Amino acid sequence: MADGTVDIATSPDGSLIIQPHGVLDADDAVELRRALVNAVRHVRPLRLILDLQDVRGLDPINLGTLAAACHLGDDHKVAVFLDNSSAVVAGQLTAAGVARHRLRGVGVASTSTVDL
C-alpha cells in the first residue's frame, strides 16, 4: 500500500466500502487509520465494509487497527464487517480479537463474472 492505495466507495445500499491493497505495513498505518476513523466518526454509515480481497498481508500495527475499527464501530453504532480476506488474514484477525461473525467471504476468490 506504499502507493497510497485505499479505495473508498459507497454501495447502492448506503454501505461505505474501504478497500486497501497489497501488503499493509507500518508505512500504511496512518492512511488506513485515518480512513477508518473518519468513516466511523464523521461519515457514520450504517455499515462499514472493509474489503480485504487485495490485502496480501498485515503487520501487527494494521492488524490492531482493523480490530480496533470493529470496537470503534460498536461505540458509534456502525456495523463493521471484514469481507473477502484470505484464510491466513482471517486467522490473524480472529487471533487479534475480531469476532468471527464480522468475517465474511473468507478465502472466496472474487470474479467479475458468475456462471449460472
Image (cartoon, rainbow, N blue to C red):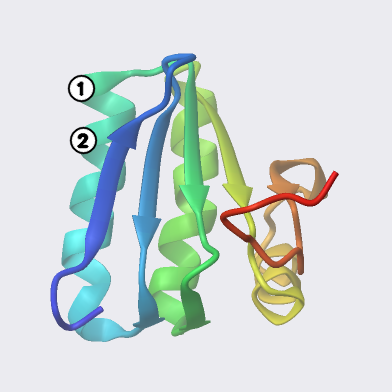
For marks 1 and 2, give the CA distance: 5 Å
The residue beneath circle 2 is 38
The residue beneath circle 1 is 42
Residue at (72, 50) in percent of width and height: 114
Residue 58 drawn at (x, y percent):
48, 81
Quadrant for the C terminus, please.
Answer: top right
Q: Quadrant of residue 41?
A: top left
Quadrant for the N terminus, please.
Answer: bottom left
Amino acid type at image mark 2: Asn
Q: Quadrant of residue 5?
A: bottom left
Could you tell me if the residues under marks 1 and 2 are in contact, i.e. CB atoms within 8 Å?
Answer: yes
The front one of 13 and 43 is 13
Residue at (14, 70) in percent of width and height: 4
Amino acid type at image mark 1: His
Residue 48 drawn at (x, y percent):
46, 32
Q: On the picture, is 25 further left or further right than 58?
A: left
